[in-house]
Amino acid sequence: MSRFKNIAHSSVERYRLATNSMRLAPDFMIIGTQRGGTTSLYNYLSEHHSIAPASMKEVHFFDNNFEKGLPWYRAQFPPAFQKHFSENIRRRGFVTGEASPYYLFHPHVPKRAAAIVPHTKLIVLLRNPVERAYSQYFHEVELGHEHLSFEEALAQEEARTHEEEARILAHEQYYSYNHQHYTYLARGLYIDQLQRWMALFPREQFLIIKSEDFYTHPDAVLSKTLAFLNISQQSKQREQTYRQYNNSKYPQARLDPHLRKQLVAYYEPYNARLYEFLGLDFGWDH
């Protein structure tokens, strides 16, 4: 009887592996930044008839779920026959992708992604790092992760996260709660994060978007993103309201002007390096 169970189990396993091999890999990934508009952009893209979303917006495979393996990751995307049907029967483009904003910041993700999906297109939204940090703080408060004041949280960031990145790099399976939730200042050092990614992926595979441009002109940024993905605009696109997703309201006026000035000064040299590296001036230093 056990022999028949083993045969049945191996048959199920072969079927599972075969099914996953017929699954698509992501054509694009929105890799960050957190609190930069990633949820809204991903939802707008997912409404397009030629874009099929993953089973969840934040798959978190390359950061927190990597031990689940490639078959699990492939299972999060549509089956290959959908792409074949769309492109060959309906004569319509077809792409799929995910959005996990921790990817930009997590030190293991670039090399993992380069090894597994080297041709995927990478979309990066970059928000004024001062506003991004403030928004993240209230997001963490809202989720119950943070109980300090914003100024106290910034003051405690070094103590909370000291050597956490080194531990992550030293231990492949190490998960750092503090690295994910309390890195308010560090996540705004975009130059270091982008250089790590661009050392492994060619520049033409990146679309860099200023979050403030996206908030002000979502239609223009969406059109630019569709062009980057080689997807045409929908011929009879319904009127979009472009409502913001995951948009926590927080008391922006309460950010002390003196603290804001300190944060602007802190980020200024990093922003200068970013502007030079990308050849773009985001105008955040005021």
Image: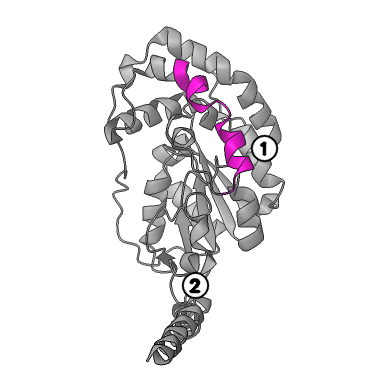
**Number of marks in picture:** 2
- Magenta residues span 155-172
Q: Where does the image place residue 155, in percent across and percent down from the top left?
A: 46, 15
**Mark 2 surroundings within 10 Å by alpha-carbon count, few (fewer than 14), some (14 through 19), many (20 or more):** some
The relative height of residue 204 versus residue 169 in the rendered view (above or below) is: below
At horizontal 54% and vertical 45% (from top left) the residue drawn is 124
Q: Nearer the viewer, residue 218 or 106?
A: 106
* Residue 85 percent across, percent down from the top left: 45, 83
Q: From what the image shows, is residue 218 above or below residue 141?
A: below
Q: Residue at x 35, y 61 (%)?
A: 47
Residue pushed farthest front? 1
Distance between the Cα atoms at labels 1 and 2?
Answer: 30 Å
Secondary structure that dominates the magenta span? helix
Residue type at numbered disc 2: Gly
Where residue 258 sits, quadrant-wise, is top left
- Residue 230 visible, this angle: yes
Is residue 157 located in the magenta-colored stretch of the structure? yes
> Quick check: is 99 in the magenta stretch?
no
Name the residue that disc number 1 marks.
278
